[in-house]
Amino acid sequence: MPDATGLELIAQEIRDAHPDSIIGTDFHRGRAELRINPTSNRDVLTFLSDRGYSFLASLHGVDYYPEEPRLGVLYEMLDMKAVDRISVKARVLVEHPHVPSVVDLWPGADFPERECYDMFGVVFDGHPDLRRILMPEDYEGHPQRRDFPVGGEPVLFTFNEEQSYGKFQ
Amino acid sequence: MEIRRELLAHSSVLSDTPASEADDTARRADFRSRQLLARDMLRGDLEGEALERYVEQSVMTTTLDKAVAWARGNSFFPLTFGLACCAIEMMSIVGMRVDIARFGFEAFRASPRQADLLILSGRVSIKMAPVVRRIYDQMLEPKYAISMGACCTSMGVFNNYALVPSDKFMPIDVHVPGCPPRPESLAHGILRLRDKVQGNSPDGWRERYDAIGTEEILSPTGRDPRDVETDLDTAAIQVFKHGDTAGA
């Protein structure tokens, strides 16, 4: 991990190269994190990749309900020579959940982006095949969003078996 | 025949003489006499009363249904089909410890066309449910299904968007509880299914517990056991006191 100072230095370098790309930085419990503008994620990630953070270790979604903007897309970048990590976080609105895809830069981002789309409804523009990956294709809704109902199926006990299916009806 | 009867009396299991050399000799002589009887019958030498007695001793009558059910119940062919961690327990029932081959259920078939028992061993997701249903539909009648473990019976710990209880999309004959059930439990479940198929199911628990549907609370008062709201105290006797969390 870069320390807090190192994180600021990297952030400033990116600001110089791509103005308006960095919204802020966060250094918490030894974890360096860049908060970025979602539209410039490709610029930032390419910059980090050239700096040595070339391995996309993880790409995942988060729902920060009730904070706004609610949805987050996190990229965990790894420098495999220095064994150094940095997180990149892009936050998007539920009403307009669009993030540019990075599949052409890291082909391994294909399935994680599909999963993020499946579970959170983040649309990755430019993804070659953005379909659901875990849930059935005709499934409605994005189940990992925090306003999604928890229990899909009511568990039957004696007291509610009347509302059941099949032999009690 | 007289000789044979004498020998039978001599070697009867009811006689309290311990197994001895004389017993052994008697059994051998009995076997010899039956051999000779069978030979005479095949030659056509047995006639009249002797022939009738021979037939009485050798032939057992039953109904075709019973005979077929007996054969079915003693030769399940489970499908090679695992869903999750329960499948590991399911695999071990063919091993030497539980050795389901003792009952004739050890031949796991690789094709649903050749299988007549589907063991749902694990959680069924809503994406997997159509696949499971399709496999069940591909099996030939008569076919049976066992729901193994908590997940596939009631979704277990996963009460969320992803899973579906197996009763929602296919008929289940036996539910085996546990998380996961031990191989012994599954073997017991299969034996209960055998009893069911052979038509001598000792499932007296519905009558005993005055049960109507899916029951987990009993009512010793004879009131409707489903009436949990008014019957909480008596019901709690059977499970644990309402609000008592000790041991939970």
Image: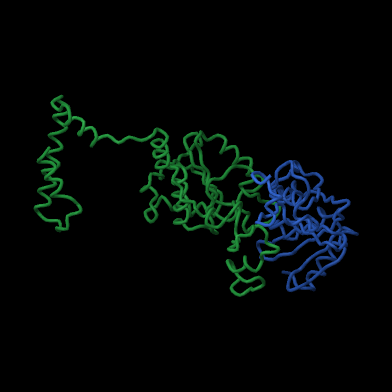
Chain colours: A blue, B green
| Quadrant location of the N terminus of chain A in the rendered image | bottom right
Q: Quadrant of the C terminus of chain A?
A: top right
Answer with the quarter of the image where residue B219 lies: bottom right
> Which quadrant would residue A145 be assigned to in this image?
bottom right
The quarter holding residue B127 reads: top right
The image position of residue B210, as x and y in percent, is 57, 56
Question: Can residue A55 be seen by looking at this rendering?
Answer: no
Answer yes or no: is residue B109 visible.
yes
Q: Give B159 or B248, whichever is nearer the viewer.
A: B248
| Relative to A85, A25 lies left or right | right
Determine whether, in the image, residue A49 is placed left or right of residue B245.
right
> How many numbered marks does the figure carry?
0
Residue A89 locus on image (x, y percent): 80, 61
Residue that protrudes farthest toward the right in the picture: A20
Q: Please state if B86 lies on the left or on the right of B38 as rendered.
A: right
Task: Name the residue rendered at 52%, 35% in the picture.
Answer: B139
State the residue in front, B137 or B196: B196
Instruction: Indicate the position of residue B224 as horizontal and vertical percent values.
Output: 64, 57
Nearest the eye: B32 or B1:
B1
- Report the residue that reaches farthest toward the top: B44
The percent coordinates of residue B188 (x first, y second) are 45, 53
Closer to the camera in the image, B64 or A138: B64
